[in-house]
Amino acid sequence: MTTSRRFADRKVDRFEKNIKKRGAVPETSTKKGKDYPVGPLLLGFFIFVVIGSSLFQIIRTAASGGMA
């Protein structure tokens, strides 16, 4: 049996167990809460870079005379 087939069978078994519980699924299987994948500092830096670069591009385009 190949590795991918074993993984597929394992996933099917896990799915079948969940289906048979009919609503008695534990809370851990669902994701709750406001846990952000990135921190606020990194998000702020990303927004600064994106908005700053777009403003820089607009100013550069306006200074060069439009569509050049």
Image (cartoon, rainbow, N blue to C red):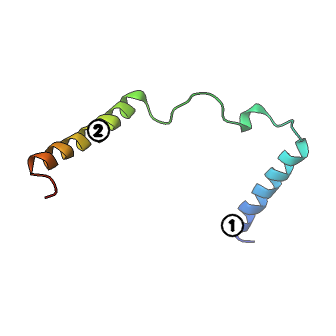
Give the SS element for disc 1: helix
Q: Residues within 10 Å of mark 2 (few under 14, many from 20)?
A: few
* Residue sitting at x 24%, y 43%: 53
Q: Is 50 on the left or on the right of 43, as rendered?
A: left
Q: Residues within 10 Å of mark 1 (few under 14, many from 20)?
A: few
Please name the residue that numbered disc 1 is placed on.
3
Query: If the image is split into quadrants, where does the N terminus sit?
Result: bottom right
Front in this rendered view, residue 28 or 55: 55
Compared to residue 11, the image places residue 25 above or below, namely above
Residue 22 at x, y percent in the picture: 89, 41
Q: Is 34 on the left or on the right of 2, as rendered?
A: left
Amino acid under disc 2:
Ile
Residue 51 disc label: 2
* Residue sitting at x 37%, y 28%: 41
Residue 35 disc label: none
Residue 11 at x, y percent in the picture: 75, 56
Compared to residue 1, the image places residue 18 above or below, namely above
Residue 67 at x, y percent in the picture: 16, 57
Amino acid under disc 1:
Thr
* Residue sitting at x 13%, y 58%: 68
Front in this rendered view, residue 31 or 1: 31
